[in-house]
Amino acid sequence: MEQEMLNIAIENLSTTTELMIETSHLHESPKNYYDGELKFFYKGLSFDMPFVVKRRVTLTQLPFLQEDLPKEGIIIMEYASKSIKEQLRRLGINYLEISGNAYISYDRIYIFIDTNKRIKLEDTDSNAAFSKTGLKVIYHLLSNKDSINYSYRKLGEISGVSIDTIGRVYRELVRDKYFVKVSNRKYKIIDYDRLFKDWVTLFNKTLRPKLKKRSFRFSNNQSIQSLLAANFNGKISGELAAEKLSSYNIAEKANIYVKGSFVDLAMKLDLRPDKNGQITMIEQFWNDSSDNSERIADLPLVYADLISDPKPRNLETAKLIFNEYAYQSL
């Protein structure tokens, strides 16, 4: 829940302002009161702020927050009443709601936003195969025909989930007749089409909104097609990946799934933040396997990215590349 709140808050504040924000040292300093640090980049300036994540902030907590939180620190919270936020500002305590409403006063930087609509988090956390963690597992099962019979440990390492999650996902996929168990710990997908389409639908609804993302543009106005020849650590998806896979599509946008710093990659590629930019960096939700050096993301992700922007051309291209490439993984 804390990580979800943090990701949503950063995304919404970045969208509202020209700030670039990254996290560091998350939960690496258990002796400190704060949970990590936010690194802010703004018009050539940069500064760090320790943060704490609290879903609720009440009047009784204010004295403790004022005492324990460093002066330059910031509270990340789901929502606070108008009176609580007034008190926080009076006490000089910086805050950021997940909606992007914020009070940040740091040296010569002053940001005050109080116009964004409140966002309420859901309290439920599904344990089903198509939960956030289950979707990470299924992505690899759809992408690589061999991964279905990897050891639970190996698949868990690639997916970034626990061994227990792998077992639960497999049991539910067998129960719901996506899989069949052919021998001890040997499985086979028997309804690839249904599993693929259900994954795409629920990835776009459940997992994608929780991933960090930021839009950019080239500072020198070069075409997004130049990304195909650029040397960087990331997976190209969406329209640009579809252009590479099919001559039917001429890309107007590109998604890059990034493991690591958006800022570092933006500097490497000479990109500038732009909420209307053609290039979107998205947090990579899997760990790279040593045998996968392809620059283009796997088909399920390319398909899902196209469907998430349902222009007629994207829908037609998604169907074409599915028909051409889907069963190569089986």
Image: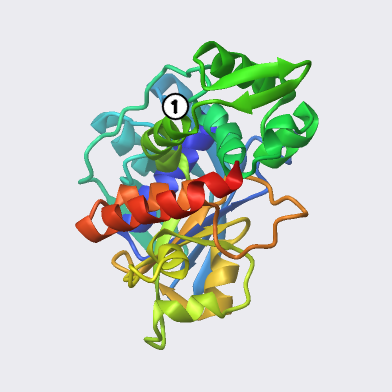
x and y percent of residue 210 in the render?
45, 39
x and y percent of residue 172 in the render?
56, 15
Q: Secondary structure at mark 1?
A: loop
Quadrant for residue 152, please give it: top right
- Which residue is painted at 64% across and 26% down in the image? 188
Residue 276 vertical placement versus 329 (above, below): below
Q: Label 1 belongs to which residue?
A: 55
Query: Which of these two is toward me, 194 or 125?
Result: 194
Query: Which of these two is toward me, 138 or 213?
Result: 138
- Which residue is painted at 52% across and 22% down in the image? 178
x and y percent of residue 267 in the render?
55, 76
- Which residue is painted at 57% across and 36% down in the image? 136
Q: How is the image coloured?
A: rainbow
Residue 249 vertical placement versus 302 (above, below): below
Instruction: Give the residue type that dot 1 points to.
Output: Arg
- Which residue is painted at 76% across and 55% down in the image? 291
Image-based side of 177 in relation to 8, left or right? right
